[in-house]
């Protein structure tokens, strides 16, 4: 975790191991780890569904802003930011 920039205390590491230790032997068990990963993915899936629902709701909200008008075109000859071709004068 320190390679990822996370500074964890000893109690943080112990809590992480306890979360995935199914038989209380102080070691990470495959079953506990797989259940933990599955619950994280399930939570992520719920968050994605909620976010998609919120986007649909926001898309239905009418706006009171005036429609955007196109910007007027500047005269190309007098545009100071125009890139000039090195082959033309």
Image (cartoon, helix red, strand yellow):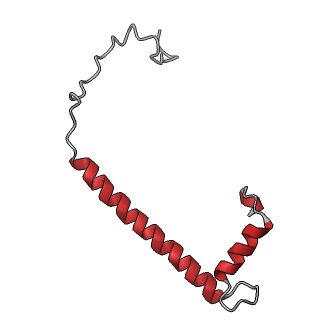
Where residue 47 sits, quadrant-wise, is: bottom left
Query: Residue 46's spot in the image, x, y percent?
Result: 40, 68
Residue 18 is left or right of residue 39, and the answer is right
Relative to 82, is 6 above or below? Answer: below
Residue 25 % position (x, y):
75, 90
Residue 17: x %, y % from top left: 71, 78
Residue found at x 36% / y 65%:
49
In this view, the residue in front, 14 or 61, is 14
Q: How many marks?
A: 0
Residue at the location (23% across, 24% down)? Answer: 69
Q: Nearer the viewer, residue 41 or 16?
A: 16
86, 14: nearer the viewer: 14
* Residue in the picture at 36% in, 13% down: 76
Query: Which quarter of the figure has residue 37?
Result: bottom right
77 and 4: which is toward the camera: 4
- The quadrant the N terminus occupies is bottom right
Against 53, residue 15 (above or below) is below
At x 21%, y 27%, the residue is: 66
* Image height of 84 relative to 51, above or below: above
Residue, far right? 10
In percent of width and height, residue 13 lies at: 74, 71
């Amino acid at each position: 975790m320190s390679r990822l920039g996370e500074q964890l205390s000893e109690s943080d590491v112990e809590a992480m191991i306890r979360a995935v230790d199914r038989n209380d032997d102080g070691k990470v068990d495959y079953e506990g780890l797989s259940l933990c990963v599955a619950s994280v993915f399930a939570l992520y899936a719920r968050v994605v569904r909620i976010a998609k629902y919120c986007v649909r709701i926001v898309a239905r909200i009418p706006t009171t802003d005036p429609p955007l008008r196109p910007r007027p075109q500047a005269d190309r000859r007098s545009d100071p930011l125009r890139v000039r071709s090195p082959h033309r004068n």
